[in-house]
Image: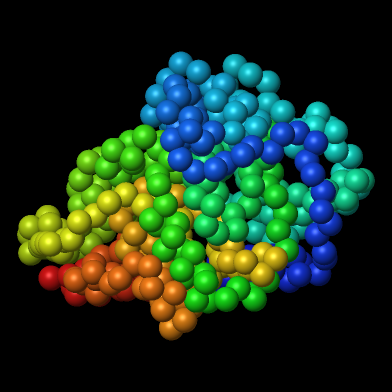
Amino acid sequence: CVRMLRFAASSVLILLSSAIPSAAFRFGSPDLSAGKGSPLAFALSQPTSVLPQVSSSKSSIARFSPTLRSSSRRSVLCSGILNLACMEAASPPMGLDEWFKTNGYVIKQSSSMGGSSWSSGGKYTSEDGTEFFVKTARQSAATMFAGEALGLQAMYATNTLRIPKVYAYGDDGKGGSYIVMEYLPLGRGADQFEFGKAMAEMHLAPCAAPEAQGGQFGFPIDNTIGGTSQPNSWDSSWVRFFREQRIGHQVKLADSPRLSEQWEAVLAATEDLEALFAGVHVRPSVLHGDLWSGNCAAADGKPCIFDPATYYGHHEAEWGMSWCASLGGKFWEGYRSVIPKDPGFDKRAVLYELYHKLNHYNLFGGGYLMDSQSLLSRLL
């Protein structure tokens, strides 16, 4: 939490120091209304390219290249709803400067807004006053930004919270990559009751992905949570999805015999986690996936969330980062006014927190190992 707050605090301070003029982008901004006929639903249903894989050696921060789950064409994601500047291996990359120039923008000013271990952020202002927020990374766009772009658009399509628009992402031709987004005037003035209510409405919104509409859990693309790989293969069973692609995946990355032993004990004690979900019907909801205090704010007075690790899952899984999100009574009052608390929530909350504590251990090490072991003990 402390490490991540450094980037969030610096970003908010800089964002608050300037006003946002009303300016239209010169290229078409997509209409992302929800529903089967929306551009997002269309894009998720079309055949798209398998993005190039990037091999990586084993380290404490597990990284990988996400893949789309269909093949043959890149046109939808590269020119459709996202206006993406993504590139296949055979295509020449369009660097950030070239992207601005191609779209008619002359950048007169740019300023750094801090960063993390895996990406850096900055504000770019063009001569006509248009402002952009740009994140850059030292890895490929396929690895770092494809999942983020599609995740932001999936949440944007619900028309519930203030979500930054995505305009492009791509490789810079120098081994790194970027994502260009709408610049938002972030602050801390969001009404917490309305924030909670809007989150519940997002969780109840129609799913754009046809697979999720059919009751499956996952996402069209594998992505990352922080700098850790997050697999999202579609699965009709939420319990199996979370057991194998969330906790099981993190336990394997941790490579700790003690953690593995405890995890096996939990599986034996809970009928492979099935007992934790007795009597509960789980339907797919679009999730932010990494909701902590550094990834939520207010924009123009409205609740805003960003930097997602999006997938379609159980709405309760959204709260696995509550220990680092400062969600108060008014927030929960708003959320519960739309989605009541299900039986067994408190026990499942331990499971959902475990995923993020394991991820923090794989990212940062230290005391998160003991936290994870404690949570595993509570599930027995």
Q: Nearer the viewer, residue 126 or 24?
A: 24
Relative to 182, does residue 276 appear above or below in the rendering? below
Q: Which residue is more in the foreground, 352 or 185?
A: 185
Residue 220, given in percent of the width and then of the height, sits at 41, 36
Residue nearest the viewer, comparing 1 with 352: 352
Q: Position of residue 299 (x, y in %)?
A: 67, 64
Left or right of 109, for residue 99: left
Residue 371 figure quarter: bottom left
Residue at figure coordinates x 23%, y 62% from the top left: 259
Residues 206 and 287: in front is: 206
Please report the residue visible at 50 percent of the width from the left and 18 percent of the height from the top: 73
Report x, y in % for residue 81. Answer: 59, 33
Residue 327 in view here: no
The way the protein has been coloured in the rendering is rainbow
Q: Give the residue displayed 38% in from the left and 62% down from the top.
A: 318
Q: Quadrant of residue 359?
A: bottom left
Q: Is residue 44 above or below residue 335?
A: above
What residue do we see at 38% from left, 29% from top?
Answer: 69
Q: Is residue 309 left or right of residue 255?
A: right
Residue 39 appears anywhere in the view: yes
Quadrant in the picture for the C terminus? bottom left
Left/right placement of residue 22 relative to residue 91 reads right
Q: Taking 58 as reference, is 283 left or right?
A: left
Q: Could you say where residue 5 lies in the image, as x and y percent from the top left?
A: 58, 70
Counting every numbered tag in the picture gives: 0
